[in-house]
Image (cartoon, grey):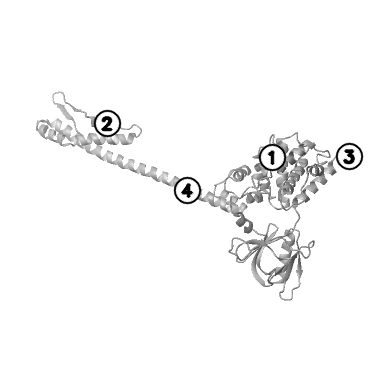
């Protein structure tokens, strides 16, 4: 810092002509007053202790009176006090800045940690929906209210659609409240039934259990009728027609279904479902044409669907299986889930060696001369024909199975009986037909009699 010091002994005044540097200090950033004050005091003290100033005091010190010398000594002591105060202020500012940086770093670390926890919670949900939601709620990453959980299921990306369907279909009261809140997030106003179903069925995958399907479709029918009060006379009508549309979609677009439902049959199937009255042919024709021209789109799972399928099976364990073409017994790891029996060479395998759909099959205990505790899977209506199943060949190709029946051996009689019971429980007809038949009977019984 440089400048010109002027002292008037007669007037007892002193002045210092400011340079450009001094003006800069005076105009320090007002947004940081502590820093500006620090700079201002430092510049002033540097000036007091600068060589030109010391030289000046040396020149004039002999001319001071006793009183002036006392006053000068007081100024020097005051200067020392100011230097100490400035040093303390400087340290305080440094401490505050360090605290701010620590706080910002801590908040960033907390945010990163919460992000990792949230991602972990989503993975847990995809593997076990109940545990995943509990984890997120317990770690305060998700509110436990029905609306908050429903929004999480409806809006969050990366969730397994099958897991969402299983979670929403549970029968506990809190799950029913979440299902209600989830359905209310859908806006069905001014949509025909096929359009509403497209939207609804895109947000999850229908579970395979009939009771879960019933609860979810009941909630859908209630919501659709709330949004479109004048379309149907009751939610039962909407419920029945919704199932009829889903089954029509399967009939028209599943290549395994040879007998395709015609428009006339679709209209005939749905006679009398509107509280004993017929729905307009124009409405049913429009719904039929919509499904015929564009099938329902099944959402792809964002999580690992195969992993989820095998995570919580109905039953699993080691069994011996008799080969179809080469009659040798091989030890395989069996998993029973989703009305299918999967078998693997090792428990660590990610993909099964074979898949046996249990639809239309029966299971029974059977005596085998070479192995004890055997059970047999067979088709009672197609004796002598191969069971529709698939397996992975030695070169990795998926090929059709060669079994007319499957012979499987357990290690104990108790284990065999448990497998038979589990397989029988899993062998069911398409649940849609039972649900629709029951609801149709209800509508017919409630219809006013002439």
In which quarter of the view is residue 289 placed? top right
- Calculate the distance from the C-alpha at mark 3 to the C-alpha at mark 1: 32 Å
Question: Where residue 386 appears, x then y in whole percent?
Answer: 74, 63
Helix, strand or loop for disc 1: helix
At x 47%, y 48%, the residue is 112
Q: Secondary structure at mark 4?
A: helix
- Give the Cα distance between marks 3 and 4: 67 Å
Of residues 277 and 117, which is closer to you in this image?
277
User: Residue beneath label 1, please?
Assistant: 196
Q: Earlier in the sequence, mark 4 or mark 2?
A: 2
Neighbourhood count class around disc 2 (C-alpha, 10 Å): few under 14, some 14–19, many 20 upward? few
Q: Nearer the viewer, mark 3 or mark 1?
A: 1
Disc 3 marks which residue?
449
For the point 40% across and 46% down, the residue is 102
Q: Quadrant of residue 86?
A: top left
Q: What residue is shown with label 4?
A: 112
Which residue occupies 24% across, 39% down? 83
Callout 2: SS: helix
Q: Quadrant of residue 44?
A: top left
Q: Secondary structure at mark 3?
A: loop
Residue indicated by mark 2:
24
CA gap between label 3 and label 2 equals: 99 Å
């Amino acid at each position: 810092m440089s400048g010109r010091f002027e002292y008037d002994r007669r007037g007892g005044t002193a002045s210092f002509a400011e340079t450009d540097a001094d003006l800069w200090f005076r105009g320090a950033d007002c947004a940081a007053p502590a820093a500006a004050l620090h700079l201002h005091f430092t510049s002033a003290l540097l000036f007091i202790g600068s060589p030109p100033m010391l030289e000046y005091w040396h020149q004039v010190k002999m001319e001071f009176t006793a009183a002036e010398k006392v006053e000068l000594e007081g100024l020097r002591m005051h200067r020392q006090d100011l230097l100490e105060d400035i040093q303390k202020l400087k340290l305080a500012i440094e401490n505050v800045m360090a605290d701010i940086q620590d706080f910002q770093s801590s908040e960033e670390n907390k945010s990163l940690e919460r992000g990792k926890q949230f991602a972990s919670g989503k993975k847990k949900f995809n593997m076990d929906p109940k545990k995943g939601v509990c984890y997120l709620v317990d770690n305060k990453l998700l509110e436990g209210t029905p609306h908050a959980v429903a929004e999480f299921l409806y809006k969050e990306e990366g969730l397994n659609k099958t897991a969402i369907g299983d979670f929403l279909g549970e029968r506990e009261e809190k799950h029913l409240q979440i299902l209600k809140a989830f359905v209310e997030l859908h806006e069905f106003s001014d949509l025909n039934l096929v359009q509403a179903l497209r939207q609804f069925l895109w947000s999850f995958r229908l579970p395979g259990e009939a009771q879960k399907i019933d609860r979810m479709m009941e909630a859908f029918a209630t919501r659709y009728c709330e949004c479109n009060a004048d379309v149907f006379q009751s939610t039962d009508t909407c419920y029945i027609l919704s199932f009829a549309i889903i089954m029509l979609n399967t009939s028209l677009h599943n290549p395994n279904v040879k007998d395709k439902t015609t428009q006339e049959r679709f209209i005939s199937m749905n006679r009398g479902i509107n509280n004993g009255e017929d729905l307009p042919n124009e409405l049913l024709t429009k719904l039929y044409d919509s499904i015929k021209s564009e099938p329902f789109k099944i959402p792809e799972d964002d999580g690992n669907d195969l992993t989820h399928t095998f995570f919580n099976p109905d039953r699993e364990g080691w069994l011996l299986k008799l080969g179809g073409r080469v009659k040798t017994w091989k030890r395989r790891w069996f998993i029973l889930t989703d009305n299918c029996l999967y078998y693997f060479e090792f428990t660590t395998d990610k993909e099964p060696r074979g898949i046996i759909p249990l639809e239309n099959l029966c299971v029974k205990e059977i005596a085998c001369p070479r192995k004890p505790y055997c059970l047999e899977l067979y088709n009672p209506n197609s004796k002598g024909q191969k069971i529709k199943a698939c397996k992975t060949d030695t070169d990795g190709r998926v090929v059709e199975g060669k079994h007319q029946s499957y012979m499987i051996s357990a290690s104990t009689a108790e284990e065999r009986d448990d497998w038979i019971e589990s397989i029988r429980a899993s062998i069911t007809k398409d649940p849609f037909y039972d649900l629709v038949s029951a609801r149709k009977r209800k509508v017919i019984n409630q219809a006013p009699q002439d």
